[in-house]
Image: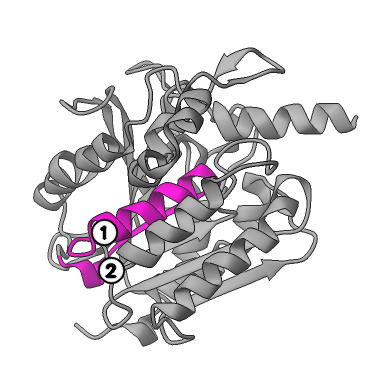
Amino acid sequence: MKNNIVVLLFVSLIVGCKAKGTSDPMPKVCSGQVERGAKFPSKYIAARNVDIWLPDGYNTQQKYAVLYMHDGQMLFDSTKTWNKQEWGVDEVLSKLMKEKKIEPCIVVGIWNTGQDRHGDYFPQKPFESLPVSFQDSLLHNVWQAKNIPLFPIGIQSDNYLKFLVKELKPYIDSAYSTYTDPQHTFVMGSSMGGLISMYAICEYPDLFGGAACMSTHWPGTFSLKDNPIPDAFADYMRQYLPSPASHRIYFDYGTETLDAMYGPLQQKVDSVMQERGYSKLNWETLRFEGANHSERSWHKRLETPVKFLLGTRNKTD
């Protein structure tokens, strides 16, 4: 049983759910509606589906904040996901909007392509700061349980972010009634998606005003033994974290399964946040006792980071 749990966690970390193109069924939502950019083209990365969730009552006479979320196929409908779990984004955000606890927003769910996920989401500048011999070993690493390479086409997170900011965001801002400024533009993800969310706000602080990084996979791979990756991430953040005067960053982690690795690593990151002047006004790190590494767990606490980023008390138009 324990081995089965480990296998499922590693499948979640590496593969997620593969995008298959225009034939992928649309997710069913409990509120709002989903529109799809099927096989959204890019000159930077492989084409992938993009699902845009619009809340009930969406209309072009008002402006909406935008929440960009990674692993977009896992957000709305558990009947369409590989592990039959979902974030429940439509339920959670609809409830918070109806209660006027968050500002009106749309969600842009960017699908992963399965095999390229690790390479898309692993922050590139920290990777390139690693010893060359370790870079080489990482690029040739495979997940032994399935003999799946972690990086079949290398590290391409810089190109993934170029796709997001140079191709996808301009499309979203032209096709939908959105605020385009960083105070209304946010990014969120979990596990490897937490890493790329951190990287996005550091690389493009003029575009993203906030990031939520849930169960952030600070090890970058599967072992902490002789692993320089967490320190590389901390050193990168020490150099590139955006100003706390105009940005908000959220971290969290659980205590079970893969999340059990994260506590001491998150503490190192928290020290960097303090060094860079972040405080409870613009930064939060939370520990969720008993929570594991799964969409079901992220759904249960999704309300917390969403309110942190989009809470009405935080915004003035």
Residue 135 relative to residue 34: left or right: right
Near mark 1 (Cα within 10 A), the count class, few <14, some 14-19 or many ≥20, is some
Relative vertical location of residue 190 with respect to residue 250 in this rendering, above or below: above
Would residue 46 be counted in the magenta stretch?
no
| Numbered range of the magenta stretch | 181-207
Q: Quadrant of residue 129?
A: top left
Q: Quadrant of residue 235?
A: bottom left
Relative vertical location of residue 307 with respect to residue 223 in this rendering, above or below: below
Q: How is the image coloured?
A: one colour
Would you say residue 292 is visible in this rendering? yes
Image quarter of the N terminus: top right
Q: Position of residue 73 (x, y in %)?
A: 46, 35
Image point (16%, 52%), residue name: 176
Q: What is the residue that sits farthest to the right in this orientation?
A: 1
Would residue 195 be counted in the magenta stretch?
yes
Q: Position of residue 100 (x, y in %)?
A: 41, 79
Q: Which residue is mark 2?
A: 209
Image point (26%, 43%), residue name: 161
> Residue 2's mark?
none
Near mark 2 (Cα within 10 A), the count class, few <14, some 14-19 or many ≥20, is many
Circle 1: residue type: Tyr
Would you say residue 83 is visible in this rendering? no
> Residue 58's mark?
1
Image point (62%, 71%), residue name: 286
Residue 138 relative to residue 281: left or right: right
Q: Which badge, 1 or 2, comes first in the chain's sequence? A: 1
Circle 2: residue type: Gly
